[in-house]
Amino acid sequence: MNYTIAVIPGDGIGPDIVEQALKVMHKVGDKFGHTFTCQTVLAGGAAIDATGGCLPQETIDVCKASDAVLLGAVGGPKWDNLPGGERPERALLGIRKELGLFANLRPAVIFEELAAASPLKPEILAGGLDIVVVRELTGGIYFGERGTKETDLGPAAYDVEMYAEEEVRRIAKVAFDMAMKRNKHVTSVDKANVLVSSRLWRRVVAEVAKDYPEVTLDNMYVDNAAMQLVRNPRQFDVIVTSNIFGDILSDEASQITGSIGMLPSASLAKGNFGMYEPIHGSAPDIAGQNKANPTATILSVGMMLRYTFGLGAEADAVDAAVKTVLAQGYRTPDLYTGEGTLVGTAEMGQLIADAI
Ligand code: IPM
Ligand code: MG
């Protein structure tokens, strides 16, 4: 088959890691007989420098015309002083909205060989960790009405959290479908003791749950969820939550694994279209130095093969290649603890490609 992919290397280490992920992807193509046709486009700081805006229309058009999008990372200190609406990060929000990427899947998985990197005590993680945070990505306070106004206390600013029932329903379905393929447990996280939008969220999630009698649904307040994630993370299977709570909790969950350089993510639209990117940021301090860990981006290609192209065996091959190279003891600087073999970005990418 032939697949078209819009590639957004972005800023900082983005180009370094994307180059390696593409290497692995083309190796998969050779091995399994697929052609991946890539078109590179600009977003974030790179787009600001080249065009003046963080998300050129051409980028949106190319993404829309492609089967999937692969993104490295955006942002960096160079653009930190721009006003909020012009910052590179704005490109991410714009792409999500433009492409209708309402479902963000962020797995937090502990790789056996890297378990010691977790900041949690080993007994808390005995038996491993395999959580997926399903974050609503195109609604809520990040996209709600915003503004400034005069108040009794002087100038004020506001952002509105609002959810339509349909927005909750469609993300809940993604979470329950995911749970059906996993351990059949969904934890819906909200703040229904305070927020009326959370009460709607909770009601709609409960309605959707009726169609999934095999799945256990728990509701949890977000403050408790933040606590439970470090107290007993193994109680979770699928966590489904709003845009802002998912932003925060997915960072917490990823940190528990201790290897943020290993974690991929998928942002899915209705149908099979998706954008795939590592969970970590652009790490400008190590950009272009052959130090970044390309694995999260490589595993993001794996998710792309699985979720958008429906190529399960090919995706399994990517996951297995990563495990093989880890088991052989190869480590990028972020994972290196003095044991095994220290390798750079390009070597890691080549090793994983060779293991396909
Ligand atoms: C993320 C990031 C983005 C978000 C920022 C950079 C806009 O934190 O993908 O989690 O808040 O969604
Ligand atoms: Mg975030």
Image (cartoon, rainbow, N blue to C red):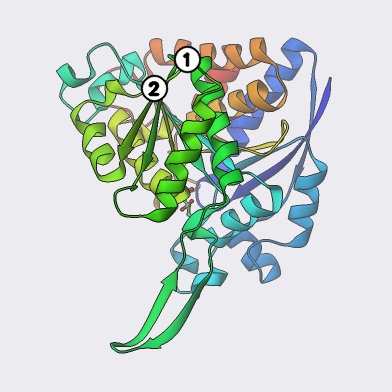
Q: Residue at x 83, y 44 (%)?
A: 65
Residue 155, image quadrant = bottom left
Locate residue 63, reporting x and y percent.
75, 46
Q: CA distance from mark 1 to mark 2?
A: 8 Å
Q: Position of residue 269 (x, y in %)?
A: 67, 39
Q: Is residue 110 left or right of residue 275?
A: left
Tag of residue 237: 2
Q: Nearer the viewer, residue 198 or 37?
A: 198
Look at the image and tell me in which quarter the C terminus lies.
Answer: top right
| Residue 126 versus residue 333 in the image, above or below | above
Residue 268 in the figure: left or right of residue 26: left
Type of amino acid at the residue the image marks with label 1: Arg
Q: x, y (%) of residue 29?
A: 74, 19
Number of numbered callouts drawn: 2
Residue displayed at 64% across by 21% down? 306
Residue 270 visible in the displayed image: yes
Image-quadrant location for residue 54: bottom right
Ligand 1 contact, mark 1 (Cβ < 8 Å): no
The answer to the question of whether label 1 and label 2 lie on touching residues, with beta carbons closer than 8 A, is: yes
Work out which quarter of the rendered image holds the N terminus and state it: top right
Query: Is residue 55 or residue 129 the one in the foreground?
Result: 129
Q: Within 10 angstroms of label 1, few (less than 14), some, or many (20 or more) residues?
A: some
> In this figure, which residue is indicated by the disc labeled 1?
182
Of the image marks 1 and 2, the number of the one nearer the N terminus: 1
Residue at screen point 63% across, 67% down: 49
Residue 305, image x and y in percent? 67, 23
* Amino acid marked by disc 2: Asp
